Image: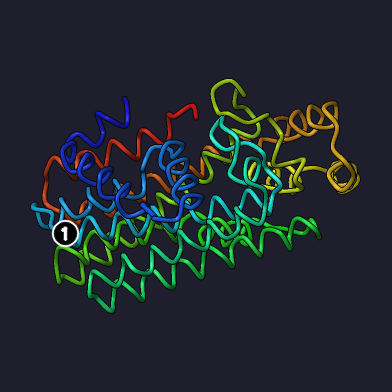
Amino acid sequence: MTIKEIFEPIEDEIEVFKKKFKERLTSNIKIVDTIARYVVSSRGKNLRPMLVLMCSKMCGGKLDEKSYRAAITIELVHTATLVHDDVVDGSDMRRGLPSINAIWKNKMAVLMGDYLLANALISIVDIKSFDAMMLLSEATKRASQGELLQIDKSRKLDIDETTYLQIINDKTGALISAACELGAITTTDAGADREALRKFGDDIGIAFQIKDDLFDFEGEQSIIGKTKGRDLKEQKITMPLIYALKQAKPEESKRILKKIKKSVSRSDVNDILSFTQHYGGLDYAKKRLQEYSDQAVASLNHFNDSPAKEGLKKFIQYNMERTK
């Protein structure tokens, strides 16, 4: 199953979105335009804007300019957060390509992230919906505070599952949930549709991040574009390890945490991966992934059957099976 197959119901609309997104980033300042063109060429799967358009289609059938502006807004904010994240993490690569900070250095990267956010503000104002502006503002705030909380917890290494879920629900889930709800806002006045899509977005957002976190333990670098154990080297403790630490004897957990506190070597990574596997961390995370995926499917039961609804169901399954 491919992304193209999943989002076939909005195949034409995706092409329109890509054109409009590129136009939105055009600048008469050469350096801004150069970096913007690099941003456009190195973007990922467009999942968040496609969720906006697919949810709009499911709620109302026909998309208008508001739906496209909402899709552009979400992608601008998401891209800005990635640009800023690479600066915070000191990452030189993004999706297998040099990051903006690696090419143009940190000052330019931070300012480019700000430029993308400013464009997002203009785009959301164009929708002329207070609800849409409030939703985007809250989602952006949540994404920022989720990242801040993760940094704080990585320094202290005292994270539990409840805090982990709070972090990923804010850091990843907020924008995905907002994308889905914006799809309803731009197409219908039905509050029940908004609520169902908000819940769907929350659950698929958490499921998406759990899947990403599993890659740090069992992904192949040539496929996922990053080395196994990178989160561990950045002192990020995610669901598989949280569970394993809870199951192990205190002295064993302390030994693992001590390894993470210092500079993690390749042998340390292998030791931590084996520890996590031994204490059922991977199986537990996969179980939770299934639970959140099932909840996302249940939220879609609110809507009438349609190609868009079927596509969103396929997206849930795709997330569970994806290899990158």
Disc 1 marks a residue whose amino acid type is Glu
> Nearest the camera: 45 or 319?
45
Q: At x 39% / y 63%, what residue is drawn?
A: 119
Residue 229 sits in quarter: top right
Q: At x 53% / y 37%, what residue is drawn?
A: 286
Placement of 220 over or under 114, stated as above or below: above
Q: Quadrant of the N terminus?
A: top left
Task: Residue 193: give x, y in percent of width and height.
Answer: 20, 64
Q: At x 31% / y 68%, what residue is drawn?
A: 124
Q: Is residue 122 left or right of residue 106?
A: left
> Nearest the camera: 124 or 146?
124
Q: Label 1 belongs to which residue?
A: 65
Task: Residue 206: give x, y in percent of width and height.
Answer: 48, 51
Residue at the far bottom: name it.
130
Residue 270 sits in quarter: top right
Placement of 86 over or under 149, stated as above or below: above
> Nearest the camera: 317 or 95?
95
> Nearest the camera: 5 or 268?
5
Placement of 165 over or under 264, stated as above or below: below
How many labels were placed on the picture?
1
Under circle 1, the secondary element is helix
Task: Residue 19: give x, y in percent of width and height.
Answer: 25, 44
> Counting other residues with Cα less than 10 Å from the Cα at mark 1, is it few (<14), some (14-19), or many (20 or more)?
few
Q: Is residue 112 left or right of residue 179?
A: right
Q: Colour mode?
A: rainbow
Task: Residue 130: give x, y in percent of width and height.
Answer: 28, 79
Placement of 35 over or under 136, stated as above or below: above
Q: At x 75% / y 45%, what residue is drawn?
A: 234
